[in-house]
Amino acid sequence: MQLYVVQTGETIWEVQQRMDSLAGVPLSKGGRESIERVAVELGPHKTTAVFASTGEAEKETADLLAKELGVKVRTDPRLDGVDLGLWQGLTISDIKHRQPKLYKQWTEAPSGIRPPGGESLLEAQQRLREAVREIVKKSKKKSDAPIIVLRPIALGVLRCRLEKAELDDVWNFVGREFTWKNYDVHEKDL
């Protein structure tokens, strides 16, 4: 079956270079505009539903897509962004200053790092994998094509799994320029 993954639109915190995962900040004007463009791009594709967490950016992105595509939004807290714990809301320069060694490890070998008070990328990947596996399993027929909306790091973590890449390569799958991609998946792939 086809599975579409969509990155949430840019948030206000991303514009400020703040770490954002669970805070629930809204999309920026540019973020809303980019999702409106993505909705037009996805228009010709047959999709059945949009899945997202209840986070503000995820919900706003999902609502914009669903409205344009004429499908329903379904929420699942397992689709939350990666919990960055005490790093949530800090700027990257704040983290580099406060915890330079840990931040360096986060950028070079992130699979072995847990932000203080947060979750590891492996824990996030397992949580996301369960949610996506259930979405795929519950799809009634092969022609179903759900859309999953995720925050950038969570999306990178899931893309590592879908593309059979190592979790330490996550930063190759995270970026502002990424908007959406479709995958041909089977439950066993997850």
Image (cartoon, rainbow, N blue to C red):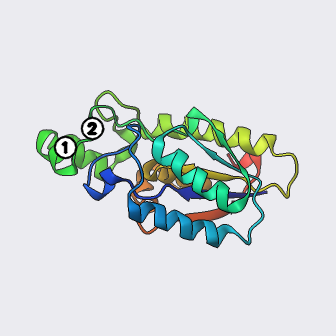
- Given the image, on which type of amino acid does mark 1 rest? Ile
Q: Quadrant of residue 39?
A: bottom right
Whether residue 73 is visible, yes or no, is yes
In the picture, residue 183 is in which quadrant? bottom right
Using the image as rendered, state which of residue 102 and residue 175 is in the foreground: 175
Instruction: Pick the quarter of the image with the N terminus.
Output: bottom right
Quadrant where the C terminus is found in the figure: top right
- From the top left corner, tell me how far across and down residue 186 is, in percent: 76, 51
For this orientation, the residue located farthest to the left is 97
Mark 2: few/some/many CA within 10 Å (<14, 14-19, 20+): some
Of label 1 and label 2, which has the lower sequence position? Answer: 2
Alpha carbons under labels 1 and 2: distance apart? 7 Å
User: In the rendered view, does 118 fall on the left or right side of 97?
Assistant: right
Q: Is residue 60 above or below residue 83?
A: below
Residue lying at 60% horizontally and 57% vertically, measured from the top left: 5
Residue 82, horizontal then vertical, whole percent: 43, 40
- Count of numbered circles on the image: 2
Q: Which residue is mark 2?
A: 87
Which residue is identified by label 1? 95
